[in-house]
Amino acid sequence: MRSAVAHRIALVNVANHGSVLPTLPVVSELVRRGHEVGYVTSPEYAGPVGRTGATVIPYASGASGAAEAFADDDPARPHLLYLAENEAILRAARAHYAEDVPDLVLYGEVPIIAGQVLAAAWKRPACRMNPGFASNHAYSYSREMIEETGGVDERTQGVVGARLAALLAEYGLQDRAGEFADRVEDLNLVFIPREFQIAADTFDERFAFVGRSAAREERPGAWRPPRTARRWC
């Protein structure tokens, strides 16, 4: 039975183990409490996501071509692949919900464009879910990775910027370009404890460090921590 305070929640995420698995216990608990969760993911993860009680909203992922994209001589290709993944997630979510929009948007660390565009277009609050290093005004893992790999050249900035501008114009959000990576939501769930974070002391009350959380039955492989291992969460 649905409780009086239940909400309809859309969760958008990319299709890989590290992004999907940590969210499953959270989704299970939301469903247990009576909330309706629609989870945008690839058909590959329909089984584990569906077993949480969430509604699976499939999208066609192009992530399988990521290795080739990074090996390509065209430096813009990985960035365009990233945008294409966000566009595919956006299309799936918009097609599923149409005009009957949900109450809240949860989004993973990779589909930040899709998550923030949906929240802005639907005029709904959003929560960012981070399986690894958190980002704020003081530290950004994505910016550090870009800098470590030599930055983004002018041509790539132009090509990717034009594609992003067209996407934002489609949703009436022309003024949002450039703020996606640095945006801090009012609530951010982080699945690695504060003790393991870079610039840990700079994260304020908007960040909830809930620790690593993976559904036991969905863990790939046979490794188990020793009984004497110290628990961090």
Image (cartoon, rainbow, N blue to C red):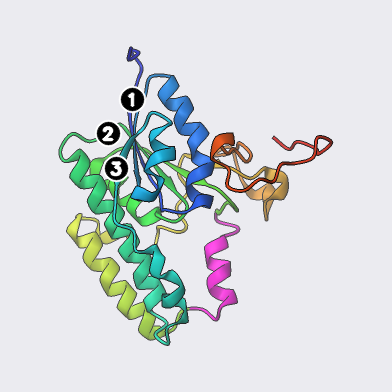
Badge 2: few (under 14), some or many (20 or more) residues near its Cα, within 10 Å? many
The reply, left or right, for residue 47 in relation to residue 222 is left
Give the labeled residue for mark 1: 7
Q: Position of residue 59 (x, y in %)?
A: 29, 52
Give the labeled residue for mark 2: 102
Badge 3: few (under 14), some or many (20 or more) residues near its Cα, within 10 Å? many
Residue type (three-letter) at the residue carrying disc 1? His
Q: From where the camera sits, is residue 188 visible?
A: no
Q: Position of residue 155 (x, y in %)?
A: 36, 85
Closer to the observer: label 1 or label 3?
A: 3
Looking at the rendered structure, which numbered label has been put on residue 57? 3
Q: From where the camera sits, is residue 43 visible?
A: yes
Say which element carries label 3: strand
Residue type (three-letter) at the residue carrying disc 2? Pro
In the image as oriented, which residue stretches furthest toward the front? 222
What is the magenta range? 136-151
Say which element carries label 2: loop
Give the spatial CA distance, label 1 vs label 3: 17 Å
Label 1–label 2 contact, CB within 8 A: yes
In the rendered image, which quarter contains the C terminus?
A: top right
Q: Position of residue 218 (x, y in %)?
A: 53, 40
Quarter of the image where one finds residue 85: bottom left
In the rendered image, which quarter contains the N terminus?
A: top left
Closer to the observer: label 2 or label 3?
A: 3
Mark 1 or 2, nearer chain start: 1
Q: Is residue 35 magenta?
A: no
Q: Position of residue 226 (x, y in %)?
A: 79, 40
In the image as oriented, which residue stretches furthest toward the right? 228
- Residue depicted at 23% across the width and 53% down the height: 91
Give the spatial CA distance, label 2 vs label 3: 13 Å
Instruction: Report the front residue among 78 and 154.
Output: 78
- Residue depicted at 63% across the width and 39% down the height: 211
